[in-house]
């Protein structure tokens, strides 16, 4: 009988990490850190369910990687844990931090085998250095370094978290309910990733893959009289612009779709739906900036962009340089890595009849190489 649910906490902002990607999205081979941790836990024990707690934005993208249960976190670790526990029905719950990413199978099995009704099993390490507290030394033989994962009685943990007290870990919460705290031997392998320097202490992390990820995007918009035409964030002298929910920058929309396609994160409509008033008339360059931030947070580096604009009208030759340099600025790329081509439809079809414009974009992405950072 599967009587344990696994909860992995990763909703923090990782403000101390100081690299472009969030630490949850450091790449190990071709897996982000959070996914490697979740998958590795499955090789150690057969859980009834695995719950991953993260931010709303992260979850929207995480769903494209795996079929685990995802829960939106709160403003603190405790709030995040409470949110996750709402869906837990098993008598026991194993809680760990995604940042404690190198798993020691023997240690985790020690924790699971020691489970006890109404109790909490905690892996610990001995203190080997002298410790002072408020200016005075304390007995290090009576001190312990607490680690995760911790295995708790679900009902007792839920009850404890109803109290208006902020607990630093699960064992503190269980102790407040007079539950048994069972200490087992921890593992130096279970080092927690907090700052950049910790990366060198985590042998389970692989070098990020050097594979190039290729994405394709296409967008089409008809003309609308009396509207300012924008292409690549550049104003085009024209008596008409594009009919669209936003400003209609068809070129930027194609680039966003190409970037999202290469990353496997979805499409422009999932992140910036044309049914939302939030994006009515929005400047598309703001959507592109937001997409670039999202990609950087998730550990992707943009390689290059190749863009083809298919338009019978207006003539774009005199705008290509401005479009190239503006798009390069928005994407944090050198201008030679942004190529813009413009062609007509040879008077064929709706483009040839001067009813609108189509744009195709191809891009490459690479995984952020934290080893070389």
Image (cartoon, rainbow, N blue to C red):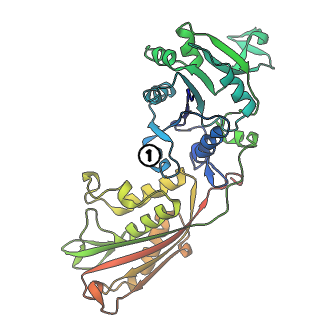
* Residue 237 left/right relative to 23: left
Front-lying residue, 226 or 322: 226
- How many residues crowd around disc 1 within 10 Å: few (fewer than 14), some, or many (20 or more)? few
**Eyeballing the image, is 185 above or below 20?**
above
Report helix, strand or loop for mark 1: helix
Residue 277 in the image: state x and y as whole percent: 24, 52
Front-lying residue, 32 or 199: 32
**Eyeballing the image, is 284 above or below 41?**
below
Q: Residue at x 43, y 14 (%)?
A: 164
Q: Residue at x 75, y 30 (%)?
A: 106
Residue 117 in the image: state x and y as whole percent: 58, 14
Residue 280 in the image: state x and y as whole percent: 25, 57
Judged from this view, the residue extending furthest toward the front is: 1
Q: Residue at x 46, y 63 (%)?
A: 330
Can the viewer see residue 169 in this picture? Answer: no
Judged from this view, the residue extending furthest toward the top is: 178
Residue 346 in the image: state x and y as whole percent: 34, 93
Query: For residue 250, what is the image quadrant?
Result: bottom left
Q: Residue at x 35, y 59 (%)?
A: 269
Can the viewer see residue 130 in this picture? Answer: yes
Judged from this view, the residue extending furthest toward the left is: 226
Q: Which residue is mark 1?
A: 57
Query: For residue 14, what is the image quadrant?
Result: top right
For the image, the number of numbered tags is: 1
* Residue 226 left/right relative to 101: left
Quadrant location, the N terminus: top right
């Amino acid at each position: 009988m599967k009587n344990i649910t696994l909860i992995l906490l990763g909703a923090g902002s990782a403000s101390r990490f100081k690299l472009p990607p969030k630490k949850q999205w450091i790449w190990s081979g071709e897996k982000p850190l959070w996914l490697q941790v979740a998958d590795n836990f499955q090789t150690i024990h057969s859980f009834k369910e695995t719950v991953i707690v993260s931010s709303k934005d992260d979850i929207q993208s995480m769903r494209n990687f795996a079929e685990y249960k995802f829960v939106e976190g709160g403003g603190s670790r405790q709030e995040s844990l409470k949110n996750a526990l709402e869906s837990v029905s098993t008598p026991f719950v194993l809680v760990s931090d995604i940042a404690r990413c190198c798993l020691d199978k023997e240690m985790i099995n020690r924790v699971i085998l020691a489970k006890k009704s109404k109790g909490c099993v905690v892996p610990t390490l001995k203190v080997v250095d002298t410790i002072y507290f408020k200016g005075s030394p304390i007995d290090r033989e009576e001190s312990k370094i607490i680690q995760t994962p911790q295995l708790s009685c679900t009902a007792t943990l839920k009850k404890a978290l109803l109290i208006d007290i902020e607990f630093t870990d699960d064992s503190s919460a269980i102790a407040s309910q007079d539950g048994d705290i069972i200490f087992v031997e921890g593992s130096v392998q279970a080092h927690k990733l907090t700052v950049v320097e910790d990366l060198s202490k985590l042998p389970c992390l692989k070098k990020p893959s050097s594979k190039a990820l290729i994405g394709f995007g296409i967008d089409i918009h008809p003309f609308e009289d009396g509207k300012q035409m924008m292409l690549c964030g550049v104003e085009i002298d024209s008596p008409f612009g594009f009919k669209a929910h936003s400003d209609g920058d068809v070129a930027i929309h194609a680039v966003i779709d190409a970037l999202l396609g290469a990353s496997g994160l979805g499409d422009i409509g999932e992140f910036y739906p044309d049914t939302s008033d939030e994006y009515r008339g929005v400047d598309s360059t703001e959507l592109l900036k937001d997409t670039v931030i999202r990609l950087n947070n998730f550990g992707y580096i943009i390689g290059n962009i190749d863009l083809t604009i298919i338009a019978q009208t207006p003539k774009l030759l005199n705008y290509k340089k401005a479009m190239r340099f503006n798009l390069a600025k928005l994407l944090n790329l050198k201008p030679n890595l942004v190529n813009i081509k413009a062609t007509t439809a040879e008077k064929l079809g709706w483009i040839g009849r001067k009813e609108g414009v189509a744009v195709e974009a191809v891009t490459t992405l690479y995984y952020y190489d934290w080893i070389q950072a």
